[in-house]
Amino acid sequence: MANLPQLRDYQQQVLADVRAAMKAGHRRILVVVPTGGGKTTIGGAMLHGAVGRGHRALWLAHRKELVEQAHERISCPRTGFGLPAGCIMAGHPPRRRPAVQVASIATLIRRDLPTAQVVVVDEAHHSVSAGFLKVLDAYPNAVVVGLTATPYRLDGRGLGDVYTALVAPVSIADLQAQGYLTPVRYFGTRKDLEPKLEEVKTIGGDYDPKALFKQFDTRQLYDGVVANYRRFADGQKAIVFNINVEHSLKVCEAFCAAGIRARHVDGETPRHEREKTLKDFRAGAFAVLCNVNILTEGFDLPAIEAVILNRATKSKALYFQMVGRGLRPAPGKTACTVIDQGGNVRHFGPVEHPDVPALEATAKKKKGDAALSAPPMKSCPVCERLDYLFAKQCAECGHVYNVGKDALEEAEFIELTDFLPKHVVVKGAKKPVPDHLKKSWLDMSEDELHEYATIQGYKPGWVHYQQRRQREGGVAA
């Protein structure tokens, strides 16, 4: 009999909940488990049970890397389930009637469909696309189980168009508390130094890449990415998510010019070169890996300690996928450092913030309302760690915040206006920051630091801290 790896308690709970849903008459079931929670393990355990009962199964994925990873895990007798599995994808020879077929959806829709009583859909938030719907409709009597960590779509379309039952027994916070995922430290640029996203138009529900790149394509921001890496994650194995190839290459050049070993990969990188780069990254040959849209799904390297969001997005799924690359625990790793250059944490909230997945469609939000569902955040005036608005103390440097009636004065007013109705007047709100102070604190003179601290109501220790950073030779962020 094939192997059945030891399952965690919540993974066993998923299987029990799926069986209960099937007994209740559901044939299409969506399973939501956070990134790093072992979705492939859960799906493989389902296939193990199905094959043991004499059924045939089909595993669907939309990307080559996901197909190859799933096939390896399902078929490998040493590290996986040891099930007899074929691979339906260009470049892979067909295998005669194996118990399990792992298929690329792009290849499968052009071939004869294999027999299957159980169908597993990897990254199931793609299930409502035309290719998946065409294949799933060909299996009206099969049990279909979708697996995803991010049941969100930019178009707001609900996955209830495909699935009738939802199983989501565990959250990111639960897995962090149990030690299966690492805690997260969030840092961000000052609100007044972030790119002007209100000037970027939207295409297909997300920011137009060309217009977004224009906002991020500045010397200050390239230097700022490097400076923030040095400040918050110096020496850590980091992955950087960029807007387009030009952007990623320039960021890579900025790291290398600063003496930090970095490389770049994208969707057009030749396969052998990409595989070598990823192998070298895993082996520690360089510290920073810059990429564009290829390492958000299916790339697992627990040793990643820092995630740099060097872009902005309106996609909650993409945000969770990017941060998720750093959540897996590893020896010596105490936390994942998220350096947010695009205001994503303020927009969506920390990934561990309570969230209730649903099958229903998401209502379209009015302009300006996108951030209202996220918890209000503030930036520590000493170390710039992002935290909840009413946190009493900074978990990074120990700075004691003013809470209660002074909470609004402690946080930058420009951050809070995103979360307040337009008619609300905040008493004690600070004066607008003058143009000559809209620059890095590391570039300010002593008089400018005192002026900025007075406007923001910061304590005298803040000026001392910034002057110390200047003496230590920090790079402008």
Image (cartoon, rainbow, N blue to C red):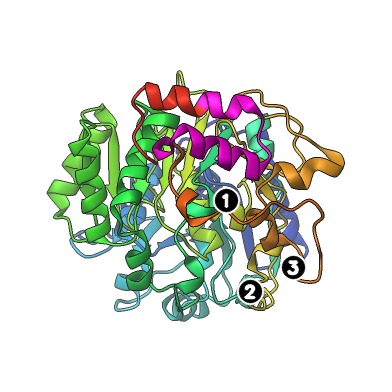
Q: Is residue 188 left or right of residue 415?
A: left
Q: Which residues are magenta?
A: 442-465
| Element on which disc 1 rests | helix
Q: Position of residue 314 (x, y in %)?
A: 52, 66
Nearer the N terminus, badge 3 or badge 2?
3
Q: Which labelled disc corresponds to residue 25?
A: 3
- Find residue 228 and report its image quarter: top left
Amino acid, disc 1: Val
Position above or below: 229 against 45? above
Q: Is residue 386 left or right of residue 51?
A: right
Crowding at mark 2 (Cα within 10 Å: few <14, some 14-19, many 20+):
some
Q: Nearer the viewer, mark 3 or mark 1?
A: 1
Q: Is residue 327 visible?
A: no
Q: Which labelled disc corresponds to residue 158?
A: 2
Q: Nearer the viewer, mark 1 or mark 2?
A: 1
Q: Nearer the viewer, mark 3 or mark 2?
A: 2
Q: Is residue 228 left or right of residue 186?
A: left
Position above or below: 445 against 357? above
Q: Which residue is mark 1?
A: 345
The residue nearer to you, when weighing 234 against 332, is 234
Position above or below: 265 against 57? above
Label 3 to label 2, Cα distance in Å?
21 Å
Q: Is residue 92 visible?
A: yes
